[in-house]
Image: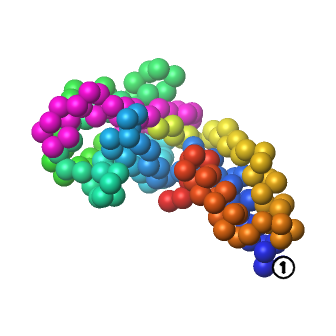
Amino acid sequence: MIKFYFIAILAIFIIFNPIYAQTSLTLPTEKKTLDVKLSYDEIILGAQSKLHIDFINPQTKKIQEHIDYTVTVSKNDKFVFGPIPLTHTAIGSVTIPVEFVDDGVYSVDIGIEGILFQPISKESVSFKMAVGDVESPPTKVPSWIKNIFGWYAQDKISEDELLNAIQFLINQKILIVD
């Protein structure tokens, strides 16, 4: 019976965990030089909101100091913040003020052009944010995952094999763990 509840809770989490609903999300840059974490508190339309950006060294998992970056926030290709010129953060974290006035899906685009006072070829990362009354598109779960959960429920595979499948979902960013 515990196995059934475990599977049910995990399945519900996977089905109802769209990326757009996250208030904190970490993604790698194109060449995986840095991980970038975007987080924010509740967005209130018409009020200034603060987006927090952390630049993270993927090897140490710690904040990477001295980053040269750019940021834009847009909706339907119209800027609501930025683009800002190339800017430097010594501490590896920044907070930007943005006023969201309309419901919709916004794009937060971050470019990185320097690390520890060394120029690099521009690497980018883009986040999608659902603001206000927006239906998030469903996250597609591979069909073989349904088979894995069924086999686990029927004791045809081990817990380790199930956990490997869950790890795959995490690695592919189908399942986001904060």
Query: Percent from the top left, x then y, of residue 35?
Result: 37, 46
Residue 121 position (above or below residue 49): above
Q: Main secondary structure of the magenta part?
A: strand
Query: Percent from the top left, x then y, of residue 42?
Result: 48, 52
User: Residue drawn at (30%, 51%), measured in percent from left and top?
Assistant: 57
Q: Quadrant of residue 99?
A: top left
Classify residue 45 as left or right of residue 125: right
Q: Is residue 109 magenta?
A: yes
Residue 158 visible: yes
Residue 106 position (above or below residue 28): above
User: Residue drawn at (40%, 34%), measured in percent from left and top?
Assistant: 30
Q: Which residues are magenta?
A: 98-126
Q: Is residue 77 magenta?
A: no
Q: Quadrant of residue 12?
A: bottom right
Classify residue 150 as left or right of residue 95: right
Seen from the viewer's position, the closer of residues 46 and 1 is 1
Seen from the viewer's position, the closer of residues 86 and 124 is 124
> Is the N terminus in the top left, top right, bottom left or bottom right quadrant?
bottom right
Residue 83 position (above or below residue 16): above
| Residue that numbered label 1 is attached to | 1
User: Residue drawn at (35%, 51%), measured in percent from left and top?
Assistant: 58
Query: Percent from the top left, x then y, of residue 130?
Result: 56, 40
Q: Secondary structure at mark 1?
A: loop
Query: Percent from the top left, x then y, of residue 125?
Result: 40, 35
Classify residue 70 as left or right of residue 130: left
Hey, what amino acid is under mark 1? Met
Classify residue 129 as left or right of residue 149: left
